[in-house]
Amino acid sequence: MEERSSNLVHTSLDLNSFSQYLPKQELPTTFNGFKFDIIIPPAATHDEKAGNLAEELNRLNVENKKLTAMIKFMSNKCNLLQRRLSDYMTNNPAQSAARKRKPEPPISGESNSSNEINTCKKPTKDEHIRPKISRVFVRTEVSNTGLVVKDGYQWRKYGQKVTRDNPFPRAYFRCSYAPNCPVKKKVQRSVDDQTIVVATYEGEHNHRHPSRHELASPGLNHIVSTGKPWSAVPTITLDLTNPSDNEGSWSRRTEWPESRQFFAGQWHLQ
DNA sequence: CGGCTTTGACCCGCGC
DNA sequence: GCGCGGGTCAAAGCCG
């Protein structure tokens, strides 16, 4: 909410802090092959108003390009980290699987050999159907100790547990909107960033969304990720000017189209 | 009084 | 077989 309204009030973003991340040797005019087209504002003219506007326009132009470079830089860095992590997991399967009881079930639509192996085991009561898994990352106030993720559905809490790898309690919810709705939700504050609450949804609702307008409470930044087994760290989709440009490794899906619009609104930079 | 949360106990899968 | 740890149950209490 604050971020939204701030877009209307002033357009300036403090990007100075980011300059430390940019390779110094490539500053100020190029970065990763991207050319900065920084225009130095002309000296003050007689028409001061026009001059101010031109100055503002130039400043915005520079900010815009800085943001583009920032996103590109972060994207590259994230891809690099994902690749390293993937390599690490490949090279150290024993360590990565240590103390892991069983891998998280894949997202619906995905299938792999390990999953097929798992299905060969003696099926347990609910193991016949692999539930659809999705994760939602919600930014909240640190002071807000409640594990409430407003998504429009009605949830009934049936348990809470402190897990080994996270000092914050994990709450277990069932969808209570429909009597036989199989959807469950786990909500836990992120151990890395206490302002992030991670909600993991399992299964699909067998009823309509009660109220699509209740989807996301204003002021919360939702970041939706699919449940790759090792994706404890959320990746962020920045839905910028070109919506079709978010495919590939950066592609993430949302539960509802509205939320995608919401995210796009939150992250839209120009 | 019905629905919800809390919380300790219990169940069960997995690694050793 | 045993212990650990995540997930679930269910009784008790709270609240509107």
Image (spheres, coloured by chain):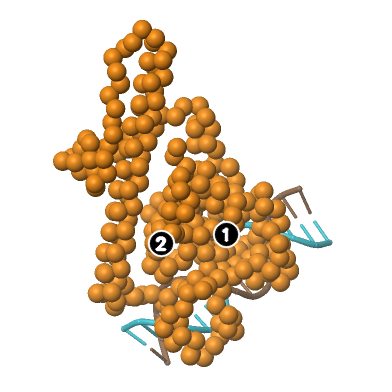
Chain colours: A orange, B cyan, C brown
Chain bearing mark 2: A
Kind of residue at disc 1: Glu
What percent of the width, then of the height, locates residue B15? 35, 82
Subunit of label 1? A
Task: Find numbered disc 2 in the image and state the secondary structure of the residue it sits on.
Answer: helix
Question: In this rendering, does residue A222 appear at all?
Answer: yes
x, y percent for residue A123? 54, 88
| Residue A191 in view | no
User: Which one is nearer the viewer's eye here, C8 or A234?
Assistant: A234
Residue under the image location 26 percent in, 64 percent down? A84
Residue occupying image coordinates x 24% and y 47%: A32
- Which residue is tagged 1? A255
x 67%, y 52%: residue: A212
Spatial CA span between label 2 and label 1: 18 Å
Circle 1 — which element?
Answer: loop
Q: What residue sits right under mark 2 in the picture? A: A248
Q: Residues within 10 Å of mark 1 (few under 14, many from 20)?
A: some
Instruction: State the quadrant of the C terminus of chain A.
Output: top left
Nearer to the camera, A99 or B9: A99
Give the mark toward the camera: 2 or 1.
2
